[in-house]
């Protein structure tokens, strides 16, 4: 099960890493000529990766919604992180957890959304701070910002995936299909029995 899920996310992981490198390269060229490039940097990072998540992972989330949530999360992080990186990562976790999720009815939607928010609040600070340590270590060895931002792209996608991927939803839908099939079979058998009784 876990091996299959890893194969499913391997391609979007690599694409997210390449997206991080691409955004870093473009923003490094625009920093001197465009005063708001530093503010848009994290918005582009998060917006692109949430878009990749929406396209590559079957969650039922529209691409437009994923892009808006990612752009907003990146914008919040760019504004708050100079003051408090920890609080900024918590806000990003709340934004991602609440914004990326398929509606499942009023009660279930609230429960799933609450669960995703809790996961986001816990996971994003851990991944961001551990990513900072890993990136410093990698930069000290390779002295390459491209490798650093490739790793950041991987980590951001992985955090979004763990926070929002419908692990429980998929099992639930499989169970619902199996239950519905059993009920349909029981209904058909009951109808056949009633027909035989009516004939007798």
Image (cartoon, rainbow, N blue to C red):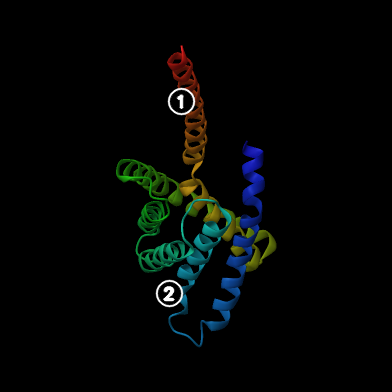
The residue where tag 1 is placed is 187
Give the crowd class for mark 2: few <14, some 14-19, many >=20 residues within 10 Å. Answer: some
Q: Position of residue 44 (x, y in %)?
A: 49, 70
Residue 64 position in % (x across, y down): 45, 66
Residue 75 position in % (x across, y down): 40, 68
Residue 36 in view (yes/no)? yes
Q: Is residue 36 above or below residue 152?
A: below
Tell me the number on the disc at residue 85: none
Which residue is at the front of the view, 170 or 140? 170
Regarding residue 133, the answer to whether it shows in the image is no
What number is the disc on residue 39?
2
Residue at screen point 52% across, 58% down: 54
- Secondary structure, mark 1, is helix
Q: Is residue 15 left or right of residue 91?
A: right
Which quadrant does the N terminus fall into?
top right
Residue farthest bottom in this picture: 33
For the residue carrying disc 1, how many other residues have a C-alpha within 10 Å: few (<14), some (14-19), or many (20+)? few
Q: Residue at x 61, y 71 (%)?
A: 22
- Residue 77, x across and y down, in percent: 40, 64
Q: CA distance from mark 1 to mark 2?
A: 60 Å
In the depicted structure, whether residue 145 falls above or below residue 7: below
Question: Left of 86 or right of it: where is 45?
Answer: right
- Where residue 85 sits, quadrant-wise, is bottom left
Determine the secondary structure under disc 2.
Answer: helix
Q: Residue 175 or 92: which is nearer the viewer?
A: 175
N-terminal-most mark, 1 or 2: 2
């Amino acid at each position: 099960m876990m091996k299959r899920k890893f194969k499913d996310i391997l391609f979007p992981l690599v694409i997210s890493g390449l997206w991080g490198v691409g955004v870093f390269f473009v923003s490094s060229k625009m920093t001197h000529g465009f005063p708001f490039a530093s503010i848009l940097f994290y918005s582009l990072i998060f917006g692109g990766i949430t878009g990749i998540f929406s396209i590559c992972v079957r969650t039922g989330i529209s691409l437009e919604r994923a892009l808006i949530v990612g752009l907003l999360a990146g914008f919040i992080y760019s504004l708050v992180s100079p003051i408090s990186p920890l609080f900024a990562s918590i806000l990003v976790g709340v934004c991602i957890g609440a914004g990326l999720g398929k509606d499942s009815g009023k009660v279930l939607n609230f429960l799933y959304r609450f669960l995703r928010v809790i996961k986001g609040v816990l996971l994003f600070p851990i991944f961001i701070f551990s990513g900072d340590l890993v990136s410093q270590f990698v930069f000290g060895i390779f002295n390459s910002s491209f490798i650093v931002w490739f790793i950041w792209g991987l980590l951001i996608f992985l955090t979004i995936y763990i926070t929002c991927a419908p692990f429980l939803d998929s099992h639930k839908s499989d169970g619902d299909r199996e239950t519905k099939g059993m009920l349909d079979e029981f209904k058909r058998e009951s109808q056949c029995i009633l027909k035989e009784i009516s004939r007798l």
